[in-house]
Amino acid sequence: MNSHNNITLIKGEFETAEAKEILRSLIDYKIRYHQIKSFNSDVKFGKKDPRSRSRISELKSSMVKMLEIMEEAEANGYKVNIDAKIDIEYLIEEPTQKLEK
């Protein structure tokens, strides 16, 4: 069993408009995911999910940075190369021990 795995999500050369569309869609999807997760937490537990709220902020910053990069590439007539990988690593948790009375 390999405890660390890698898959390729995006790989290739793109026109800036296409790259922007692909990356915007991915980031938008992740923002919506965390908005829904936080909303569900608010409904169930009366408070928004702090991890999701933090990720929303990070993702919005990533969106701004990505758009700046794409604008610069487009202004200079560049294509862009994107190589996006996902690393997946198994986390082995130690079983909790029951206290004896």
Image (tube, helix red, strand yellow):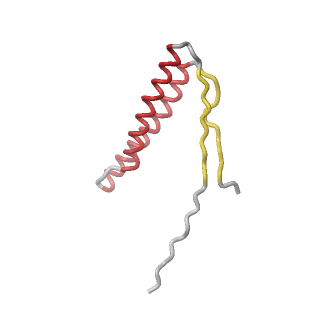
Q: Residue at x 46, y 25 (%)?
A: 67
Q: How many marks?
A: 0
Q: What is the quadrant of residue 58 in the picture?
A: top left
Up-down relation of residue 26 to residue 94 (above or below): above
Q: Nearer the viewer, residue 88 or 33?
A: 88
Q: Position of residue 95 (x, y in %)?
A: 54, 70
Q: Which residue of the protein is positioned furthest toward the left in this rendering?
A: 46
Q: Nearer the viewer, residue 73 or 24?
A: 73
Quarter occupied by the N terminus: bottom right
Up-down relation of residue 27 to residue 41 (above or below): above
Up-down relation of residue 96 to residue 40 (above or below): below
Q: Residue at x 42, y 43 (%)?
A: 55
Q: Position of residue 94 (x, y in %)?
A: 55, 68
Q: Position of residue 24 (x, y in %)?
A: 48, 29
Q: Which residue of the protein is positioned furthest toward the right in this rendering?
A: 1
Q: Which residue of the protein is positioned furthest toward the bottom in this rendering?
A: 101
Q: Residue at x 41, y 34 (%)?
A: 61
Q: Nearer the viewer, residue 95 or 66?
A: 66
In this image, 53 relative to 67: left or right?
A: left
Q: What is the quadrant of residue 93 in the picture?
A: bottom right
Quarter occupied by the C terminus: bottom left
In this image, 35 relative to 22: left or right?
A: left
